[in-house]
């Protein structure tokens, strides 16, 4: 059949089972939106307030569903507004397809109105970016984009299409997408045998799992593996929910704001098994002192990650679902009672603590944990102290229930991602946990929430400062609070009301209890402005590039200050 480029694009999206797009129209992409109008019975489009919101929404949709997220933008500033969202997805290995339209082919390279080489701009932050200048190349480019976004180590892809291509006619033949097989190109018998040998020899094994487990849908295999080898489990920020956090074997998050049980346990283990992790600096601290007593076994789909940050004694490269299944098949069940007792003793000796005499960030998260169903709730966060508290004090029992910008640390991520998650799962409770600094970056997306009648609940942990930066300024910069104080007259509850969303303001634990219960029961969009003290801090903590063995709590810090 003969179709124009815009219709070919729609047909390719339908081939890929795309049912939702997030975007914002403009001049160069008008032909695409005209075609979208004709396909509106099969493809739902969510008009965001800003292109960055569209990129974050596509990202949130992808994280929540495991399918590729799709966003549209026009040329020039429309396309460049996607960049932060694309980079966020790139750092966290999220399958996202960004489709932009550029000026006509004859206008390229002439500094035409709203012309930008977005394929070039996006090249370092995508798995693949391309400019389509011939209509015959369009369908193959879209098909390749989806395949690359979802295969191997997932990630974002950008396809830029010139305006004349979106209008040009071409013969189109539908193609059924081939199933994407799990990656095993680098998987060897030698590596598997070496891994089994190391696991069998270990007396104090510790599992460190990350977002790669979630990407590979390998949570069941991870659970079986942990029970089979008798090992405790710690998770990265991106790995939250990869292992049931109510399981006694779970020790909490690892790293800068990880639990003492995790940080000290990793320091004491004799085998650390990293599964789907990057060994990022926020998890390892000083890499020279990281897991000094242990051999390191690294399981990952991407060979580029092995030995990049931490030297591994052995590795197995392949889809971690396949790798774990194979290891589970080869290993006998083993118990390490003395080691597990040592870990449990650490958990009992060093529980998470916070002040109980006032409204605090941890209290709000714990209350959410108490009031919500873990099976039907998606927690989305922005970046900062509230993000750490959300990982520490909420119990994630299943994968894809925690959505957060880990690698890039994108303030303003939460609102867009919550829109994407709620669009994907209209019947689930989606809670966007944010700070006052983050919220003001993309609060314009409240209009999207209101217009689309999305029941997103936004909880603002409002300390009237840039909390995490202030915490560093307090601890490492002599309390010089340069440009981190946000003492202004903004009334977030009133802003929410003005944008069509119910607004609340709470200042006490009693008020928070009542409002959280009311909002959760209502299943309607709301913004809850929770005012806390400006010096509420995240503990435990490891100094930047410090040793995990030197992890300290508020009590440790207080004792240290008293000695000085």
Image: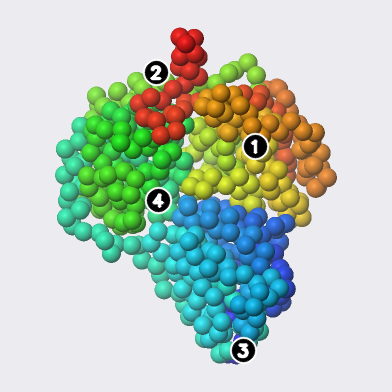
C-alpha separation, residue under disc 1 versus residue under disc 4: 27 Å
State the CA–CA distance, disc 3 to disc 4.
41 Å
* Res. 169 mark: 3
Q: Quadrant of residue 318?
A: bottom left
- Residue shown at the point (52%, 48%) measured from the top left: 408
In the rendered view, would you say 450 is above or below 73? Answer: above
Label 2 – label 3 distance at C-alpha: 70 Å
At horizontal 53% and vertical 68% (from top left) the residue drawn is: 120
- Mark 2 lies on a secondary structure that is helix
What's the distance in space between the residues labelled 2 and 1, CA to CA?
Answer: 31 Å
**Disc 4 designates what residue?**
212
N-term mark: 2 or 4: 4
Which is nearer the N-term, disc 1 or disc 4? 4
Of residues 342 and 87, which is closer to you in this image? 87
Check disc 2 and report the residue beneath it. 349
Q: Quadrant of residue 235?
A: top left
Residue 175: percent from the left, percent from the top?
Answer: 48, 80
| Residue 510 drawn at (x, y percent) | 70, 22
Q: Position of residue 374 (x, y in %)?
A: 54, 39
**Labels 1 and 3: the sequence-earlier one:** 3
The percent coordinates of residue 227 (x first, y second) are 30, 38
> Tag 3, which secondary structure?
strand
Q: Tell me the mark number nearer the camera, choosing from 1 and 4.
A: 1
Q: Which residue is rendered at x = 80% and y = 42% of the image? A: 495
Q: Considering depth in this image, is 284 or 219 the residue closer to the camera?
A: 284
Q: CA distance from mark 1 to mark 3?
A: 49 Å
Residue at horizontal 45%, vertical 69%?
147
């Amino acid at each position: 059949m003969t179709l124009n480029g815009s219709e070919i694009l729609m047909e390719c999206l339908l081939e890929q089972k795309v049912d939702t797009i997030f975007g914002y129209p403009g001049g160069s992409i008008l032909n695409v939106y005209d075609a979208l109008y004709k396909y509106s019975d099969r493809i739902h489009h969510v008009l965001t307030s800003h292109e960055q919101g569209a990129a974050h929404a596509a990202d949130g949709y992808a994280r929540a569903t495991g399918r590729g997220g799709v966003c549209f933008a026009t040329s020039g500033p429309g396309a460049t507004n996607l960049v932060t969202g694309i980079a966020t997805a790139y750092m966290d290995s999220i399958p996202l397809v960004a489709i932009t339209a550029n000026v006509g082919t004859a206008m390229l390279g002439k500094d035409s109105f709203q012309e930008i080489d977005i394929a070039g701009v996006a090249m370092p932050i995508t798995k693949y970016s391309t400019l389509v200048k011939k209509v015959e190349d369009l369908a193959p480019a879209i098909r390749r984009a989806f395949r690359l976004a979802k295969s191997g180590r997932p990630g974002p892809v950008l396809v830029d299409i010139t305006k004349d291509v979106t209008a040009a006619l071409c013969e189109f033949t539908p193609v059924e997408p081939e199933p994407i097989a799990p990656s095993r190109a680098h998987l060897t018998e030698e590596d598997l045998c070496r891994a089994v040998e190391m696991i069998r020899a270990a007396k104090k094994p510790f599992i460190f799992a990350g977002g790669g487990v979630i990407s590979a849908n390998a949570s069941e295999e991870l659970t079986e593996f942990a029970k089979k080898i008798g090992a405790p489990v710690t998770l990265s920020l991106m790995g939250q929910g990869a292992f049931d956090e109510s399981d006694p074997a779970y020790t909490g998050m690892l790293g800068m704001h990880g639990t003492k049980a995790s940080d000290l346990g990793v320091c004491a283990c004799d085998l650390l098994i990293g599964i789907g992790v990057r060994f990022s600096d926020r998890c390892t601290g000083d890499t020279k002192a990281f897991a000094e007593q242990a051999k390191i076994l690294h399981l990952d789909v991407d060979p580029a990650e092995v030995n990049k940050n931490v030297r591994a004694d052995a590795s197995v490269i392949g889809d971690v679902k396949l790798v774990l299944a194979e290891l589970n098949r080869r290993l006998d069940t083993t118990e390490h009672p003395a080691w597990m007792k040592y870990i449990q003793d650490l958990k009992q000796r060093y529980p998470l603590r916070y002040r109980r005499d006032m409204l605090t960030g941890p209290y709000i998260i714990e209350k959410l944990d108490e009031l919500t169903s873990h099976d039907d709730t998606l927690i989305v966060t922005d970046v900062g102290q509230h993000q750490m508290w959300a990982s520490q004090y909420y119990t994630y029992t299943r994968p894809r229930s925690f959505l957060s910008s880990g690698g890039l640390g994108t303030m303003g991520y939460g609102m867009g991602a919550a829109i994407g998650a709620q669009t994907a799962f209209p019947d689930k409770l989606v809670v966007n946990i944010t700070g006052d600094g983050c919220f003001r970056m993309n609060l314009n997306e409240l209009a999207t929430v209101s217009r689309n009648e999305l029941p997103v609940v936004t909880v603002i942990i409002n300390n009237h400062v840039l909390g995490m930066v202030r915490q560093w300024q307090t601890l490492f910069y002599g309390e010089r609070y340069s440009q981190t104080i946000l003492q202004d007259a903004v009334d977030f509850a009133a802003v929410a009301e003005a944008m069509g969303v119910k607004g609340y303001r709470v200042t006490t634990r009693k008020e928070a209890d009542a409002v959280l219960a009311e909002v959760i029961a209502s299943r309607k969009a709301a913004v809850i402005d929770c005012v806390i003290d400006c010096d509420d801090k995240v503990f435990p903590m490891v100094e930047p590039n410090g040793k995990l063995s030197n992890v300290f709590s508020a009590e440790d810090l207080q004792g240290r200050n008293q000695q000085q």
